[in-house]
Structures are given as structure tokens and as C-alpha cells.
Image (cartoon, helix red, strand yellow):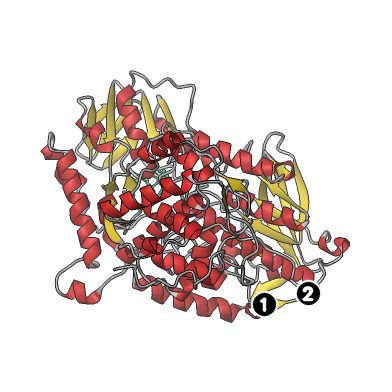
Amino acid sequence: MVSGAEDTVLGGERGYPADGEVNGVNGGLQNGIQHANGVKADEVDEAFIRSAVDKSAINALRMALYQMTGDPDLATMKITKEKIRGGALYDYVLSTEDEQIVKDKATEYLLKGPHTTPPPPSVSEARKLMNLFGGRMIADNDVLPGYEELCYDEFPRGVDWTKDAPPPPKEIITSHKVVIIGAGLSGIAAAIQLKRLGIPYVVIERQENLGGTWLWNSYPECRVDTLSYLFQYKFEKNYKWPEFFAARQDTLNYLEHVAAKYGVKEDFQFNKEVVAAVWDEASSSWQLKVKNKKTGVEEDLAANSVISAAGLFSVPNLPDIPGITDYKGHMFHTTEWDHSVDYKGLRIAVIGTGSTGAQLIPNMARAAKSLAIYQRTPNWIVTIDGYRAPVPSNLNWMFDNMPYYWNWYCYAAYFRSLDLAAIQVRDPAYEAKGGCINERNDGVREALTNYIHKKMAAKPELIPKLVPKYAPLIRRLVMDNGFYDALLQDNTELVTDGIEKITEKGIITKDGKEREFDLIVLAGGFKTSKYFFPINYVGRKGRKLDDLWSKDGARSYLGMVMPGFPNLFSLYGPNHQPRGGSLYSWAEIWARYAVASVVWMIENKAKSMDVRPEVYEDYQSRLDAEVKKLIWESPEGASYYVNEYGRSGVNMPWTTSEYHEMVIKPNPEDFNIS
Ligand code: NAP
């Protein structure tokens, strides 16, 4: 699609006067500050040598430059979609000639400094710019999520007291106490929102520090597989990531940095676990039992509202394999990595080849004397450009010197992520013609099958064991950290015969073969349907969440609230895993909903809000209907997305934009208020 139609993007004016919708500043550079003083030509040249790992970056640069200059040539450039990750995603790219023009114009612009940075565009102006970036008109419900991802506001998803009304008196604000459970990235997002508003809260965390799943998972080579410029908070601008895909420690450093900068860490209580929670009608509060993990001592804690940020990946799945307790060698789950075990030169088994297993197997293969990889179901595996690449100083230089470039660079990563959703939708007409799922899904399948053939050319006998029999995206795609390369090593063996039992010395497979090991690594994933474990919330009239969920597993309204459980808000709750964007953004969005609910209660002198059962039930019917259009429940590839009842209970069936619209703020009419 050609983007040239949007030649009126600036509305004939320069300077993007705010139209009342803008309330903040851009990322990295303050409005109106003179910059680019002393910029040298060789620095600019250098900056373009390798400013990014993906080609959308030049398109992002075009948008920043267009925002700064209004140069009409930049608005008429054609955008094409280029397949990446086997066609699972697209890059939105310019022609080679236009890329050169953008670089030349950007060089000229940067050398001409100093410039004055205009204020960021309003929402409606930004919409026109977003149309230009993608080369297509974005839908109405794409606008606000996209605007938030552009990070123009100082705190893009901040909750405020009602505008045009004085905030409630301090004693009213401070009378509503919140307990956040979990100090992972969602808990931190919620804490920062509450801190901004002066609402008292504590964060209870069972681990010894913040970081949630990123603290817990210390297995070798643990790192994110989403570009860090997407996988980050939107209120923290121009953070200098050391690598494009942050390693675990860099993620922890980032979370520490954010928690310290926004002053929330002092409100965290570590080594404490909430083990019970009962709603007390008389006081309209949750009565929590908190266990000190070090001393074993239990204490009581009351909260007017509870925000559960306990995470999806918080209960390890220890495979229920016969004889597992008989084994005498080293054995641990990936979440409980025993760093005292030097695995160099050992005979190792890894059970499980999901994202975790596949990520650590190459490292194990390099270190081990021998490595047996127990694969029950193969996964579709994709490559990522720049997976281990350091962020070059050139790119940071550009972020610092080219106003709004960082914003567009981050937006590019977000925009790309939205394309995944379409691959998960069944196309009945296409399937009637003999295709599987839809045309794009089949295209991805072909590309990823070819990838396996290419990688495994030296061991073709393994190919049939590695090509999944189910369609891509029925499960989460796994990133290739060198999994196939590891299988080519002489010291590795792919074992696909089912496991019969574990013995004192090793593992016996169903064909009767016993292999002996010094170390067995359990990469068995997580019990994702055990929401809130170990807490079984007791709500109104003594009803437990397990009672509410007895029919077919955990459910919620909007992923966040359950009827009969007032003032309990879950972040990453049932059917909450999004289909696009990044978890940091969703944590902000979920925290916004939860904290806005608390603000609503404070402002309206309400003690509780409890989602109405009919609202909840109506939502379930719509959710079930939506899930049926998608592919996760396909039995041939069912994964942790599907619960023990065969129901898709983890993922959000609506697209990013559709769900964003539903959850942008709480609707008091959805709730019984007391
Ligand atoms: P997972 O995707 O659920 O994989 C678990 C693996 O263990 C599967 O291969 C599974 O086989 C196998 N398994 C489980 N029980 C077994 C048994 N009794 N016998 C034999 N094999 C058994 O879990 P995960 O790999 O920990 O990943 C979970 C999620 O964490 C990912 O989807 C992702 O969202 C996140 N993650 C992300 C990254 C990253 O790169 N950013 C890294 C790690 C994890 P079946 O497939 O046959 O069930």
C-alpha cells in the first residue's frame, strides 16, 4: 500500500499545536531544548553505519524527521511489508533509494543544528503519522494504543484524579490501603501508579528481591525474545539497553533502575508470601495472612484492595514422571537452577524443549560430555536478527540527537508485533479448500519447515522428529538460540521415545532403553492454570475462587476481576495473555485499570466494587465465542495455553486494539458498588 495519500498530515501547519489531548513531553528530549550543537559529520556518518537491527528503523527515522521538518518528500515514500521470522511478522520498509534519501536528509538536518524540538503531536495528528509509518490507514481503536506506544506523554498510561475537581483530602486518600502481591514487572507498574497518587500500598514478594520470573529464572542464557525497545515501560524514556534483546541480568538491572528512580522499592517487603486471603464484609477489606519465608512466622495484613501481580509463570511444572524421586544424581527445575553444580563435562539430560529448554540447550550442549534432549512435542522455532547483538553507540547517539527517533523506533517494534494476531485466526473458506488455518499461517509453516530442513541438512534423519504436526502459533513460537546447531553436535542425542520412568541413575524410555546421567534438568514449564496459587481467595459469603471456577477452570472479567471477590484485581489473570504488544505495556494497562478503580472508589466514597455476575457471564459467552475463531484449542498442538478442561484459559482472544478499548478504564456500571 502506498503511503503518499497522507499529504495533509501536518494540516498545513508546523509545530503541532496541542489540541488538548497532549499532556506531556517527548521521549529523551525536552520540548524546546536546543540540541545537536557541535554535531560532527563523521559522527552522523558513523551513526548510520549500523543504527539498528531491523529495517523498520529507517522508516522510524523518516517519521521522526518528518515530524521535525514537515518535508513533504518524506510523506510520499512507499512502504512495503517485508517478511521476518518466517513471515510471522513484517518489517515496514522503504525502498533502498528512499532509505538513502532519508539518511541524507537526516544527515543534513542533524548537521544544520541547533534545532528547536516542537511539542509532540496531538492524538489526531499522531494518527496521521501512524498511517504514514505503516503505509495504511489504522483503525479507530488502533489510535490510542498506538499513541501510548509512541510515548509522547511523560507518563503515557498514568492514572490521575478526576480533572477539574480538587483531589480528595489526604486523609481520605490514605484511608484506602492497597496490597500488591508480587514484585515482578506488573507489580512494579502498579506500585508506581499508586505512588504517583499518594495512595498507600505495600508490595509483598516471596523472593528475596524484585524481578519476578526474571529473578526466579537464572538458568544459563536466559534472555528476552522480544526487542527490548518494546519490552520495556513506556514511562521510562530512552533507557540505554546494552543489547537489543536484554539478557536476564540486564532485565533485572532495568527493573532495579526503574524501581529506584520512581521510589517504590522502599515499599517492597521481600521474603514474604501471602498464603491466605478472606474478604471481610463488615470492614469491606481483605484480611491477608502473610508468611515470612525466613522465619515461618505468619502475620495479618488488611487491605481495602488487593492487586494480584503474581504472574502467569510462577508455579513450576515438575513433571509427574514415575520414579522421579528415586534419582540419585543432580536434578532441578529450570526455575531452581543449582549454581553450585558445575555441569561442564557431565552427562546431562534436559526434559522439555519449550522456550526455556530450547534457550538453554545450546549452552548445555557446549559444556556437556553428552547431552540427551528429551522432546515430547516438537515446537516451531524461528530466528531473530540481532538476538545477541550489543546496541551500538551509534544508535544511542541517534536516540539522543534525533528528536522523536526513539519514540518511532519503539513504535516500530510495537506495530510489527500486531501482525502476529492474524495468523491465529481460522479462515473457514481457506480451510474448505484444503488449507490449514489460513493462508499466512500456511506460509509461515512452509518457511519454518524449510528452515528446519536447511539447519538439519547434515542430519536429515532427525528432520521428521523436528517438524511439528500442528500449525504454527497454536503454541508460542520458540526462538532459535542455537537449538538445531546443538542437535548437530556429536555429543548430543534427540530422544523422542516417551519417558517410561526415572531410575536411580537415569531415564528409561518406552523402548526400554536406559540412559545414565549426572544431571537431569527439568525444563517442564509452568502450571499456568493455577492462578494465584497458593492463595485460594475466599470472597463474599465464604465462596472460594475454586468454587467459581469449578466448571472449566479459571475465568475473569477482562482478565482482572471476578464476581463475589470485590476489590481484587488481577494483573496477568485468566485469559489475560495478550496477542500483541509487550507485557510491560500490558502491565501498565492492567495497572491503570486496577488503580483507576481504586481512584474511583476513593473519589466516590465507595468501599467496594464487585463485578456484576451478569456482566461476568455475558463476557464469558463472548469470550468463548471469540476463542472458537482461533486456534489454541486445537488438540494436536495443545500447550499451556489450554487448561485441564481443554479450554483456552490463558490467552486473551481479542486483539490488542479490541481489548485495549475494553480496559482503558473501569466502567462503574459493570460493578455492584457498596
Ligand atoms: P513450556 O513451553 O510449557 O515447555 C515445557 C516443556 O516441557 C515442553 O517441551 C513439554 O512437552 C515438556 N514437558 C512437560 N512435562 C513433561 C513430561 N512429563 N514429560 C516430558 N516432557 C514434558 O514451558 P517453558 O519452556 O518454560 O516456557 C513457558 C513460557 O515462558 C514460554 O512460552 C514463554 O512465554 C516464556 N519464556 C520465554 C522465554 C524467552 O525467550 N523470553 C524463555 C523461556 C520461557 P510438551 O510440549 O509435549 O508438553
Q: Secondary structure at mark 2?
A: loop
Q: Is residue 522 above or below residue 30?
A: above
Q: Secondary structure at mark 1?
A: helix
In the rendered image, residue 561, in percent from the top left (x then y), is placed at: 60, 67
How packed is label 2: few (under 14 Cα within 10 Å), some, or many (20 or more)? Answer: few
Cβ–Cβ below 8 Å for labels 2 and 1? yes
**Disc 2 to disc 1, C-alpha distance:** 10 Å
Quadrant the C terminus occupies = bottom right
Which amino acid, by three-letter code, is at mark 2? Asn
Residue 673 or residue 299, whichever sits in front: 673
Which amino acid, by three-letter code, is at mark 1? Pro
Going 24% across and 63% down the picture, which residue do you hit?
Answer: 440
Along the horizontal axis of the image, is 594 left or right of 586?
A: right
Along the horizontal axis of the image, is 254 left or right of 198?
A: left
Residue 186 or residue 115, whichever sits in front: 115
Going 68% across and 56% down the picture, which residue do you hit?
Answer: 193
Q: Residue furthest front?
A: 112
The residue to which callout 1 is attached is 668
Disc 2 under 8 Å from ligand 1? The reply is no
In the rendered image, residue 78, in percent from the top left (x then y), is placed at: 30, 63
Q: Residue 541's image quarter?
A: bottom right
Q: Is residue 165 above or below residue 249?
A: below
Residue 647 visible in the picture: no
The residue to which callout 2 is attached is 604
